Image: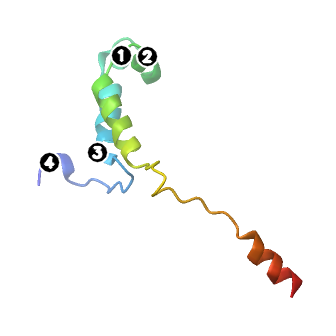
Amino acid sequence: MPKYYEDKEEDGRACAGIREDFTACLLQHDCVVKEGKKPSECLKEGHCKGLQVAFFECKRSMVSTSADTLQIWTPDLDSEAERHTD
């Protein structure tokens, strides 16, 4: 196993690998390290843009908005009314 993964806590969140790479890119970038700017400022300047887009696409892929898979819970009002009248 590569040294990179030794003694590493498991991150079960979605897109954990890309999230880690994106965070490391920002925190180790000259914009933050040498210029002392906030990571959010460096993002606005376009640094680590490729990883930002990849992370966004990964997160977006976790959400399905198609009508056949999107299920919104709505109470069955008729059944509720029948239960309360008995």
> Which comes sooner in the sequence, label 4 or label 2?
4
Query: Residue at label 4?
Result: 3
Q: Quadrant of the C terminus?
A: bottom right
**The disc labelled 4 sits on which kind of residue?**
Lys
Vertical placement of residue 31 versus 21, above or below: above
| Residue 22 seen in the figure | yes
Residue 38, how many percent across, how many down?
A: 46, 20
Label drawn at residue 46: 1
Q: Earlier in the sequence, mark 4 or mark 3?
A: 4
Q: CA distance from mark 3 to mark 1?
A: 21 Å
Residue 17 tag number? 3
71 relative to 42 in the view: left or right: right
Q: Which residue is mark 2?
A: 44
Mark 1 surroundings: few (<14), some (14-19) or many (≥20) residues within 10 A: few
Q: Are marks 3 and 2 in contact (CB under 8 Å)?
A: no
Residue 25, given in percent of the width and then of the height, sits at 29, 28
- Identify the amino acid type marked 2: Lys
Element carrying mark 3: helix
Disc 4 to disc 3, C-alpha distance: 15 Å
- Mark 2 crowd level (few <14, some 14–19, many ≥20, 10 Å Cα): few
**How has the structure been colored for display?**
rainbow
Query: Of callouts 3 and 1, which one flags the residue occurring earlier in the amino acid sequence?
Result: 3
Which residue is depicted at the point 76% across and 69% down?
77
Q: Which mark is residue 55?
A: none
Picture coordinates of residue 85, whole percent (x, y): 88, 83
Instruction: Name the amino acid, label 3.
Output: Gly
Tell me, yes or no, whether the two marked residues, 4 and 2, touch with CB atoms within 8 Å.
Answer: no
Point 35% across, 15% down: residue? 31
The quarter in which the N terminus is drawn is: bottom left
